[in-house]
Amino acid sequence: MFRKCSFIDNRPALYVLNEHPVGKRIVMISKRCLNFGDSQMSQQTAVGVNDVSKKFGSYQALRSVNFDIRENEFFTMLGPSGCGKTTLLRMMAGFETPDTGSIQLHHQNIVDIPPHKRRVNTVFQSYALFPHMTLSQNVAFGLENLGWGQAKIEARVGEMLERVHMQDFASRKPAQLSGGQRQRIALARALAPEPKVLLLDEPLSALDLKLRQAMRDELRSLQRDTGITFVFVTHDQEEALDMSDRIAVLGSGEVQQIGTPSKVYEEPANKFVADFIGETNFLDVDVLESSGTSATIRTPFGQVITVPCASAVPHGKATLSIRPEKLNLGDQVEGVDFEAKVVKKHYLGGYTHYLLAVGGAEIRASRRNASRAGDDFPIGDNVHVGFVENSARVLVK
Amino acid sequence: MTDLSADNRTQGPKRKVNLPYLGLLPAWVIMGFALILPIFIIAAVSVSTRGAYGGFDWGVDFAGYRQIIFNEGWSGEMEFTPQYLLIILRTILLAGVTTGICLLLAVPVAYWIASQPGNRKSILVFLVTLPFWMSMILRVYAWMIILGRGGPLPRFLEIFGAQEGLSLMYNDGATLAAMVYTYIPLMVLPVFASIEKLDGTLIEAAHDLYGNRWTTLRRVILPLTAPGIVSGAILVFVPALGAVLEPILMGGGKQMMMGSLIQLQFGGGRNWPFGAAIAMTLLIVVMLVLIVIALRSAQKDREV
């Protein structure tokens, strides 16, 4: 009777009622999308992190961190270990208290609310399934504590187990499951009480590579289907790029950048972000002139070019970040070009990675082997290298 | 065993298999002399006849066991007497209550110790075992001072209007206090060990899933620390059954307990077979309880 008709940001936004008794078409707008403004999804804040600082002994884990997580968003906190991402997640769950600042859930300060009264659930890194309970008892645990009726609990547990394809294992104990299955149960258990926000603490890190890939898809579609805000913590940049609506890159207790995956990859705000996400080459350059969005620089190879930049870069020394896949070799060259010598190469089938020496610096380039004759730059030879201006980025040194 | 020897025969001479068992011989000898032989001797004494001047004469006679339930009249008729059964029941009750109180006190203490940072944890565990370094009889005397007339506790109660010259000694409560004090470390240590093994994120998960403290304790912490609690309960209950000092010194010996009853038969009563029969009865009861517990936990393991 209903047909999904229009998608906004991959979510069904409009439903069309086709066979209305009177014969008219009635357009219905899905409830979830009622409050979207322009082309974006709803901008309501699910979690607000306001000026949060935390010290563990003499170690400053977080330095006045500020950001908002939007409703229905797959939000990732990405950073190396010790960057404070897990501490932030644990603050949202209620297991840590900020020294200063506040954490808000739907505009309500929750700092003083104990974990068992917060409508958020966590998927723990180690899954933390109760070993003495069956899988259905595990999933039912939260619902029982919320005081749901027996019949409602049973229905919900069945529904959740089915959703994660574990309905045949309901009466097993966690010890009888594989890592991936435990992961699914942990997800089902955390999603069953319909939390306002789901917190995921590196949930894929204990799985093997293949399973991790499959779970990424599953997590993403679970998030889309349930419409619950996901806050995902990881140190794996590929995971973050693949799944997130937005990524907060954290480093040394501070937010380095927040943005969509392509934004943080293509337009890193600083050296830390450029270095942490993906691979990149840093070249020392001189800034001759700069505005807020672009800068005119002299490259080490002598050219004067104009390149995008994150913020106003001061005159003098700066860093040019250029990613290996954006350096073209041989016949693929366009834009700024220079000569370099092949030092090392790694043939990887689809790609060949080259280590090149130029003017005393070593840079990495990766070349897509588009044709069979792709692998034709022998070690020791000079090769023609180039990049398009707007694929590089000037960063504060 | 058979598999092992069959396996080894294909590889080499058989004596290689027996050597490890031979190596265990000292252990077997010690076990045999220290643990098994004494029990067999007591079992033998329990079915022997009473010696004319104390001690016993070897033989097979169940008079000792009969005496627990029946009183033999002058003319040899058997009359049911509950007095010894009552002593046994009272002893089991006292040991049970001791175990219960120890459990109630030890779980929070163990939980608190387990939540302390590493260094302080080991100091606290050491402090729990500290009383063992002093003779038990001295510790019981210390309690006699605490509870006795003019002792700190009666003095304290006098402030709140208790009559002057109050003594809290020589009653079941005093016995119980000393028993709990004596045996509580035996409960704290195994409970602590099992709480420490408990994965802290499980407790976080319980809170995260809307469980308050009580729910978390009842549905997550207690079930998962049950093995430690059971072994603690056994470690307290079993010696509490045989306690002699506390009932005599603290209870004033007014209420006969099994331990002092047995001691009496081997001492002043000069009825070794009867004393041994009570001891054996106690042993069998304890064994039965332990076997039931072991079977139940084995069954639980199979379920997991």
Image (cartoon, coloured by chain):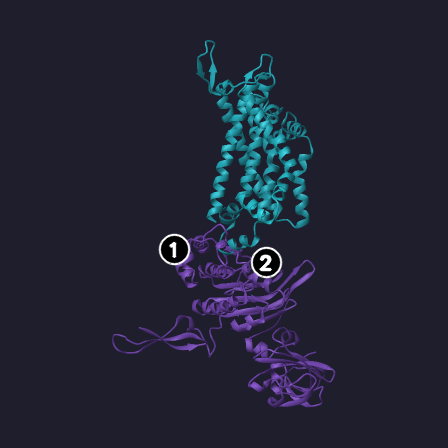
Chain colours: A purple, B cyan
> What numbered label is drawn on residue A154?
1
Judging by the rendered image, the residue that carries numbered circle 2 is A96
> For the residue marked with disc 2, what is the amino acid?
Glu
Which element is circle 2 on? Answer: loop
Q: Are marks 1 and 2 on the same chain?
A: yes
Nearer the observer: mark 1 or 2; the answer is: 1
Q: Horizontal and vertical percent for residue A128?
A: 53, 56
Q: Is the Cβ of the residue at disc 1 closer than 8 Å to that at disc 2?
A: no
Coordinates of residue B226 in the picture (x, y in percent): 52, 43
Query: In the image, is residue A255 above or below residue B165?
Result: below
Density class for disc 1 (Cα within 10 Å; few <14, some 14-19, many ≥20) is some
> Circle 1 — which element?
helix
Residue shown at 52% from the left, 68% from the top: A210
Indicate the chain on which mark 1 is placed: A
* Residue at figure coordinates x 52%, y 31% from the top left: B286
Which is nearer the N-term, disc 1 or disc 2?
Answer: 2
* Chain of the residue where label 2 is placed in the rendered structure: A
Q: Is residue B126 left or right of residue B262?
A: right
On the picture, is B284 further left or further right than A342? left
**Residue B108 % position (x, y):** 57, 43
